[in-house]
Every structure is written in structure tokens, then in C-alpha cells.
Image (spheres, helix red, strand yellow):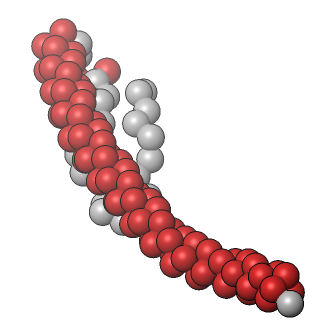
Amino acid sequence: MEWPLVFAAFILGLILGYIGKTLVSRGLGKSSKGAAIERSKMELSQHKQEVSDHLAEQRALLGQLTEQINRLNQHWNQGSQRLAKEEQLAPLPAMLTSMPDTEERPETASPVSVQ
């Protein structure tokens, strides 16, 4: 009569062990998933900040380039006024120095053309 009791205790131990392992693994899975989600959110916000900083730097550099091109155009216009006759002059147009903050391009802005 001892063997059936030992066998029943063994089966009961297997069942309780499986249930305990399942409960513990579910609890650990939730915490590791939560940590992974938080880590992903942190990486995403860091990447967004890097992109924002990069775009701000590029905008500043493009503004400087526009100013330099406008100064060059003014220099060429002044030189052409000194060297050419008045009726032959067609001054170079100035570039836009600032773009609207919206993503839409202005309707009136057109590419700079040299005549």
C-alpha cells in the first residue's frame, strides 16, 4: 500500500511544480517585457532628439549659406553696375532668407533664375 501513496505524491508534486513554474515565469515575463518597452521608449526619444538637433543644425547652416549667396549676388550686382552700361543690367534676384515654419512650401517662391 505504500507504493500507490508514493506514486500519488510524486504525481501531485509534478502537478504543483508545473503550476508553480508557470506562475513564476508569467510574473518574470511581464517585468522583462515592461523593461524592454521602457528601454525602447528611451531609445526612441533619444533618437528623436538627435534627429531634431541635426535638423536644427542643418537649418542654421542653410541660413548661413543663403546669406553668403546673397552677399555674393550683391557683389556681382555692384561689379556689373561699375563695368556695364545701365540698359544692359539685370540684377540678380535675392534668395529667400527664411522659410515658413510649416511644412508647406510657399506658392510665390520660385527657383532663382539668372537672366
Q: Is any atom of residue 24 visible in this view? A: yes
Residue 52 image position (x, y, % from top left): 30, 52
Residue at screen point 31% across, 47% down: 50
- Indicate the position of residue 60 as horizontal and vertical percent values: 21, 41
x%, y% of residue 3?
A: 85, 82
Image quadrant holding the N terminus, namely: bottom right
Quadrant in the rendering for residue 23:
bottom right
**Residue at left 54%, top 76%?**
24
Residue 54's image quarter? top left
Q: In the rendering, at what x and y percent does residue 74 appear?
A: 17, 27
Q: Residue furthest top?
A: 83
Q: Is residue 6 left or right of residue 53?
A: right
Residue at horizontal 77 percent and vertical 82 percent from the top: 6
* Foreground pick, 76 / 95: 95
Residue 12 quadrant = bottom right
Total numbered circles: 0
Q: Is residue 8 visible?
A: no
Is residue 19 found left or right of 91 in the rendered image?
right
43 or 115: nearer the eye?
43
Q: Quadrant of the C terminus?
A: top left
Query: With 92 as the anchor, is 10 left or right in this view?
Result: right
Q: Residue at x 58, y 72 (%)?
A: 25
**Image height check: is 93 above or below 79?**
below
* Residue in front for this viewpoint, 97 or 94: 97
Is residue 25 toward the left or the right of residue 64 in the image? right
Residue in front for this viewpoint, 51 or 44 = 44
